[in-house]
Amino acid sequence: MNPISHSFSSQDMASLKIPHTDPGIHSAIIHRLMFHLYKAHSLQNVVVVCIGTDRSTGDCLGPLVGSSLAKWDSPLFHLYGTLDEPVHAMNLQDTLHKIHNTHHNPYVIGIDACLGQSSSVGCIQVVNGPLKPGAGVNKELPPVGDIHLTGIVNVGGFMEYFVLQNTRLSLVMRMSEIISSSLYSAIREWHTRSTLLAVPE
């Protein structure tokens, strides 16, 4: 789980924060992801790391996203973290070692749940730089990702473990569907355009 979220300036292209109920959310997330992906080398291995556990309603956002992405069985990215094989505090370090030993110069996209202010619950964020899983519940875990996506699933600041256990599954499910479909669309479009640009005249 990620630390308590902060608002970002709308002029800051490095980050996006948008309510999951916004009618243009898919387009907004896809365009922001494309903005970041174009900074990556077209030959880089894209690796998606979905962090969390199915033992906590609030913290299962990542594994839900991972399981949704796994259904596409896409060769365009490598996936770590699903409901069946979650990436969590106990195996995160080993997973990161495996990623960097297996994939040359990977471009890593981290996905996690986070807690925030009550007015931000239900928002999805796309942020440049790594996420810090576990910081919201005072765990020291390694940072993950060249960029990351987080879903603000509940209110932070007090009894975080209890809050996570009492998060509405319906909200987490809706956010996971938005994140997985938008991420898949963005990677597919980025790969298509990069391939076309790489074709010699």
Image (cartoon, helix red, strand yellow):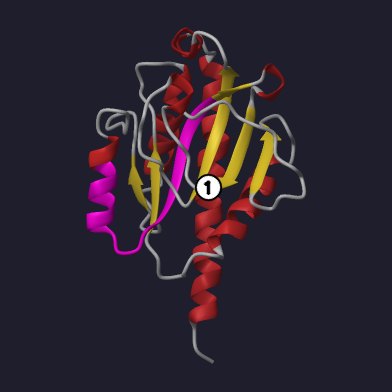
Viewer-side residue, 179 vs 102? 102
Q: What is the x, y in percent for residue 64?
A: 43, 30
Does the stretch in magenta take in 110? yes
Residue 170 vertical position relative to residue 188 in the rendered view, above or below: above
Query: On screen, 131 above or below 34?
Result: above
Q: Residue 50: image x %, image y %?
A: 40, 37
Can you say which quadrant of the picture contains the N terminus?
top left
Residue holding disc 1: 183
Q: Residue at x 40, y 70 (%)?
A: 43
Please indicate whether residue 25 sits to the left or right of residue 55 in the image: right
Q: Quadrant of residue 22?
A: top right
Residue 103 picture location, percent across and down = 28, 59
- Residue at 25% across / 28% down in the picture? 90
Which image quadrant: the C terminus?
Answer: bottom right
Task: Residue at the far bottom: name it.
Answer: 201
Q: Residue 174 in magenta?
A: no
* Kind of residue at disc 1: Leu
- SS at mark 1 in the image: helix
Residue 15, can we see it?
yes
Q: Is residue 113 left or right of residue 30?
A: left
- Above or below — where is 124 with respect to 199? above
Q: Quadrant of residue 143?
A: top left
Is residue 71 something that shows in the picture?
A: no
Extent of the magenta region: 95-114
x and y, in percent, of residue 49 in the image: 38, 43
Residue ID at (45%, 10%): 165
Categorize mark 1 by other alpha carbons within 10 Å: few (<14), some (14-19), many (20+).
many
Q: How many marks?
A: 1
